[in-house]
Image (spheres, grey):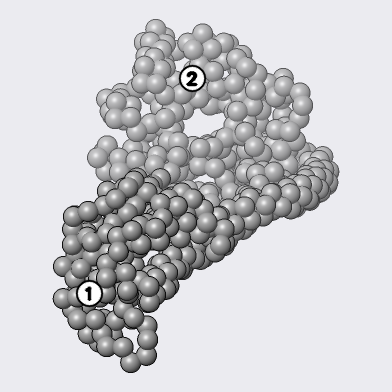
Amino acid sequence: MAKAPETTATAASAGPAPALVLPFGARPLRTFGLVVALPVFLLYVMSVALVIAALAIMAGEMDRLEMQRSLTSMHAALGSVLNDLSSAVADEGTWDEAYLNVVVKPDPAWLDSTWGATARLGQSYDSVFVTDQAGAIVFGQNASGPVSGNIATHIPAAPTMLANLDKGIAATGDATTVSSFAADPEGSIGLAAISIHKSSPGQLAVPREARRILWIARHLTPGVLQDIAVRYQSPLAALDATPAPDMSTLAISDADGKPVGTLAWTADRPGEIAFNHAVLVATGVFFAIGVILALCLAAIRRALVRRAEEVTAAQMAAVETAASSAVVAGAAAAVAIDAAVDLPLGLISGVSAADFVIEYQPILDLRSEALVGAEALLRWTAPDGTVLPQESLPPRERARLLDRAGIIALRRVAGEIAPLLGVNLTLTVTPEQLQSSVYAEKVFGTLGATNFPAARLTLAVDAPLLPALADIAPSIAELHRFGVTIALAEFSIDPATAAYLDAGLVDRVRLATALTGRSDGGAAHEALLAATVDAARTAGVAVTVPGIDRREQAAKLLRLGCREFQGELLARPLPLAAFTQLALAPARPAARKAG
């Protein structure tokens, strides 16, 4: 058995080359967008929204206060109409001539020439009535002509007003007046009434049966409402039975509480005007802020990219410097590996499973002549200094060491290969590892810690060591859920491996070297090889051919439809620095050969 202490020492002294870790992560622009640009944009949008919302609330409050003011103003204006009518009826009802010509000696001609003439002119009032206490009209006149009958016929609310007047006279005397809004056949009116009496001091009240009630009324015409608007600086209102939804309204009720009309007007909206002006100003301010933010973010982005390029260039220089010496060490290590092909099963006793170095053997697509991935190969050192390469150990001995290396190996290789974007990684694991209930969670946690995408990882398990399908299917399904690819290594078609293909648990197969390595195989061997490749292609899984060391071997498998190849013919296993140099080389990888 060959020993290689000097070679091992050389490789160990070279050590793993520094991993190509990009500043700000593998995607600095994406990091900048998520960490800086997106929060700034969201803060900007939220600020705009908050300012617009605050302006809208202020505008709404201004409009509400203006609407309340217009309602108060309209109430006061209508109250003044009734007050004016009450003053007018009080002046007319306490006139001595009125007492003489209505109560003492009724004179229709006098009534017509005074109150009737005024009503026809329609200046201070446009309707006048003189009734008895029961409401019978003694004299009546409006713009349309004489009025007769009972006042309740023309004004339904008059009986209630008569009752209120009677109560007032009983309480305070003949000087009592009553007023209210009412309705007559021509529309809504303001109405006031008083008992006609003599104004001399000490005059006794007119007996109830001898009372004559003077009524004066004024219709709420557009002209009257316009005068109200001018006098009281209130909005111009109109009687409208069906006002628009956006108009302010005020219902008018008579002495019975029944509606006799609805005043509607368009209230001023100072808040809306102020809101439009404020939004215009805010738009200009936020536009200027947005331009400044965009310029600042662009400057930060340029600085970040420039810094990333500088650090990457420095790291590349370090990698290339390390590679010049590491390639020599890799070649020496390859010689030692070649000498260690026949290892006894007991050789791994005393070997520390956690004490290993890693090399990477490129996987090439010979049709596109591109590097598509690498297999991570672990190298242990026996107590006597013998190098124990993973690929040369018997399957069960290899499985024991891989079991002990465990998740440590995955963390190492994922951390080293993560910066090499586009390079997929294959790592051999054992069935016992896959069957562990926590292995999938450990894999996922390790990938997250090393920033290695799950889609770039392939876990390969030796097909001869596979347990029953039902024992391992749940664990493989969990790894699939995380996005990890599963491959069967040392694969040849038989009932057990066919069951795995049919169950859809396998994404890739790595052909058995016993199938691909023989050059003297007979017809049965060639048929088995063709059937194995055909079974994989039928199942829709990718095929990788490891262990290629002869051109005719590669040509035959290319004819069978295989694309991805790995072996000494193409590239030896390389230390990280040499593999990084190969992966980043501008030349086509298929044209290069290490070692």
Q: Residue sitting at 44 percent across and 54 percent down?
A: 122
Can residue 327 be seen at all in this image of the molecule? Answer: yes
- Image disc number at residue 211: 1
Q: Residues within 10 Å of mark 1 (few under 14, many from 20)?
A: many
- Image disc number at residue 10: none
Can residue 356 be seen at all in this image of the molecule? Answer: no
Query: Of 587 and 391, which appears nearest the observer?
Result: 587
Q: Would you name the residue on which mark 2 appears?
A: 516
Q: Residue sitting at 26 percent across and 74 percent down?
A: 104
Q: How many numbered callouts? A: 2
Which residue type carries mark 2? Answer: Thr
Quarter of the figure that contains the N terminus: top right
Secondary element at image label 1: loop
Image location (x, y in percent) of residue 589: 70, 24
Q: Residue sitting at 38 percent across and 61 percent down?
A: 115
Question: On the picture, is 194 further left or further right than 415?
Answer: left
